[in-house]
Amino acid sequence: DAMVIQNPRYQVTQFGKPVTLSCSQTLNHNVMYWYQQKSSQAPKLLFHYYDKDFNNEADTPDNFQSRRPNTSFCFLDIRSPGLGDAAMYLCATSRDLWSGTDTQYFGPGTRLTVL
Amino acid sequence: GQQLNQSPQSMFIQEGEDVSMNCTSSSIFNTWLWYKQDPGEGPVLLIALYKAGELTSNGRLTAQFGITRKDSFLNISASIPSDVGIYFCAGHFRTGANSKLTFGKGITLSVRP
């Protein structure tokens, strides 16, 4: 089945130790997104890639970076995780950004714990 | 910025009952989406609505895109225990080439057997 895959599902890191979360998709979608979701809150967009074009949200901390080496894969790098970065990180894709093609499909998420 | 209002925060119903959830905004949205999220999982798309007035069903779920483009509702008929979860409405607002998805705060649905 075509899908959005996130690995690992659970990640534990230490305060200040860099961590990378992975997302892959078999949908061949042009757009990939990273969201942060804290408990009992809605997902919050961090950034997205339209093909190779990176679009950062204005309030995304510099501590969060992303890489998209090819259409299928997108990575979220947290350079120096703080306790406040513990959250569920969701990857999503959409075929494009135009009307009717921008519906987003989410992966299962990676739960990040910072010790 | 655009905001979506979902209330109440929690709903409790009996198995077999129907339930309706609303989502409203003071701004116009181009697309309305309804997602369900189970604990520890990502949101799963239930229904996507692309035109004002559109009424769409997906099994026991029915959703409508309000005529004013400022609201949407989701109905679940004959609820079952696996309907438990958080239901998010989300809307797309497009300006030029930019398309931004805004989420409501979600409604937690509990179904009593």
Image: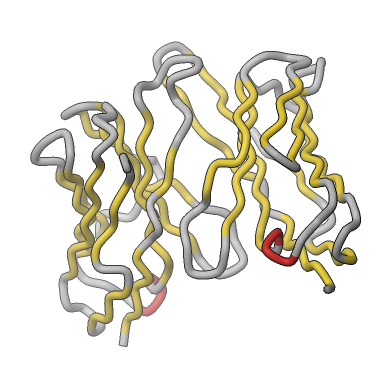
Image position, residue B5 (x, y; %): 76, 43
Quadrant assignment, res B60: top right
Farthest bottom residue in view: A115
Task: Tell me residue A83's x, y (percent).
Answer: 37, 79
B19 vs A22, left or right, is right
Looking at this view, is A28 or B92 the one in front? A28
Query: Which residue appears at 21% of the width and 52% of the height?
Result: A65
Please identify the quadrant where the N terminus of chain B is shown.
top right
How far across and how far down the image is residue B16, in percent? Answer: 88, 59
Instruction: Name the colouring of the figure.
Output: secondary structure
Which residue is pictured at 84% across the width and 72% down the height?
B112
Question: In which quadrant of the rendered image does the C terminus of chain B lie?
Answer: bottom right
Residue beneath the point at 32% across and 81% down:
A114
The image shows a total of numbered marks equal to: 0
The answer to whether residue A70 is left or right of residue B83 is left
**x 65%, y 48%: residue:** B88
Side of A41 relative to B109 (left or right): left
Displayed quadrant of residue A1: top left
In the rendered image, the vertical position of residue A106 relative to residue A19, given as above or below = above
Identify which residue, A25 or B28, lies in the foreground.
A25
Query: Which quarter of the figure has residue A52?
Result: top left
**Position in image of residue A37 (x %, y %):** 48, 60
Q: In this rendering, would B10 be left or right of A8?
A: right
